[in-house]
Amino acid sequence: MKKALIITYYWPPSGGAGVQRWLKFVKYLRDFGWEPVVFTPENPELPEIDNSLAADVPEGLTVIKLPIWEPYDAYKKFMGKKKDEKISSSFLSEKKQNRFLQGISVWIRGNLFIPDARRFWIKPAARFLENYLRHNPVDILVSTGPPHSMHIIAMKVAQKTKLPWIADFRDPWTNIDFYQELKLSANADRKHHRLERAVLTNANAVTVVSRSMVEDFSKIVPRSYTVITNGFDEADLEKGIATTPDTKFSIAHIGTLSGSRNPESLWKVLGEMVTESKDFASDLEIKLVGKVDYSVIQSVEKNGLAGNLKRIEYMPHNQVVTCQQQSQVLLLVINSTPNAKLILTGKFFEYMAARRPILCIGPVDGDAARILEETHAGEVAAYDDKEKTRVVVTRFYNDYKKGSLRVNGMGIERYSRRTLTSALATLMDSIT
């Protein structure tokens, strides 16, 4: 088999969204003639610990680890956090923060840690890999970001070794949803754009997760881009305990729910429906699984829904699959940010595979809306479209009362992790 060296920050036991994409690629690459070798930090700052993901790591996989220094201890001390407290992504705060201190920390993050807080790993990691590859040759390099420091490492190694290199973008760089919140100086903004252009220009291939990301990157560097979306693992569905849906009319959001994803129009609609109907008030259950910004909880409570709320702090991925299959409705909220149209989260495809109706709050002309229309897996309502939101919720609720709330989903098989890995292997074959 040919060998691929994969540079990734997130790897089991890391939980959360960042680990899923490349864990699943690595799981299936051997089926298509590629032996993966994973390079990852020995002591990263992990968003969550999920030991269940170890079951997906192929037997005998070579995983190379190198210690990393990150400034998070200093950040936690500055913000008054406990040393073992997890750092949330996307500016999510589960508790109300000191705005002044938060503003200073964001400025430092955006202007001094370019491209991100893992920048101090770039030089030692590149030196380590250059030496490693002299004695352990591979056929291709792959980097996945964010964090985009992984791309800079790969670029340096590719320049020294002349190995072909794929830069995989799970999210945009300068068009990521929180980029405008980084309080960047003009000089810092130029540095981010310069590094982004360098990666997009020098990589032999660039993979992205949506069509709109191709359009976005093409404005920065016109070149060929390959869309390989996120997906679902059929093996996960087999592990899930097939049960009947929840007795309650459960609307479940699984994953990070940041302030920029707070579906205020939905909470208003649900609050009104709870006030108008005792049956609906009794049946409704709002399940929020994962990290939730305090502003979301405030909105839920403000609309009189505190009694309908069920919070689950974190759920291992093997249990998430079951939760998705049991929930009556799966809530997908696209960030209310300028890049909203191009967002395609990993959980979106797992939602579709669960065969439960999806309620998407987001742009009606975005990539997620297009796929929902193609697959008939759910409905989309714009952020502030209370009327459409109410129509969809009412229809789902009426079907629930009749015992007929379900979707079939058409053509979702093309989003299976194994099928997507086949597309990745084909790309890798083409540039080696």
Image (cartoon, rainbow, N blue to C red):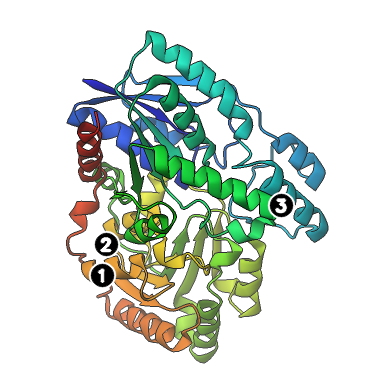
Disc on the earlier residue, 1 or 2? 2
Relative vertical location of residue 252 with respect to residue 149 in this rendering, above or below: below
Relative vertical location of residue 215 with respect to residue 383 in this rendering, above or below: above
Query: In the image shown, does 249 or 201 lie closer to the viewer?
Result: 201
Query: In the image shown, does 142 or 256 lie closer to the viewer?
Result: 142
Verify CB contact (< 8 Å) between mark 1 and mark 2: yes
Quadrant (top left, top right, bottom left, bottom right) of the N terminus: top left
Q: Few, some or many C-alpha atoms within 10 Å of disc 1 (few <14, some 14-19, many ≥20)?
A: some
Quadrant (top left, top right, bottom left, bottom right) of the C terminus: top left
Q: Nearer the viewer, mark 2 or mark 3?
A: 3
Determine the residue positioned at 63% across, 55% down: 91
Percent from the top left, x then y, of residue 207? 34, 45
Disc number placed over residue 211 in the picture, else none? none
Q: Few, some or many C-alpha atoms within 10 Å of disc 2 (few <14, some 14-19, many ≥20)?
A: many
Confirm whether residue 291 shows in the render: yes
Identified by mark 1, the residue type is Arg
Determine the residue positioned at 35% across, 65% down: 368
Disc number placed over residue 406 in the picture, else none? 1
**Quadrant of residue 301 within the rendered picture:** bottom right
Disc on the earlier residue, 2 or 3? 3
Determine the residue positioned at 32% across, 32% down: 26
Q: Secondary structure at mark 2?
A: loop
**Quadrant of residue 166 within the rendered picture:** top left
Residues under labels 1 and 2: Cα distance?
7 Å
Residue with the mark numbered 3:
106
Q: Is residue 12 left or right of residue 71?
A: left
Residue with the mark numbered 2:
355
Query: In the image shown, does 323 or 174 lie closer to the viewer?
Result: 174
Residue extending farthest to the bottom is 276
Relative vertical location of residue 367 with respect to residue 81 in this rendering, above or below: below
Disc on the earlier residue, 1 or 3? 3
Q: Is residue 75 left or right of residue 308?
A: right
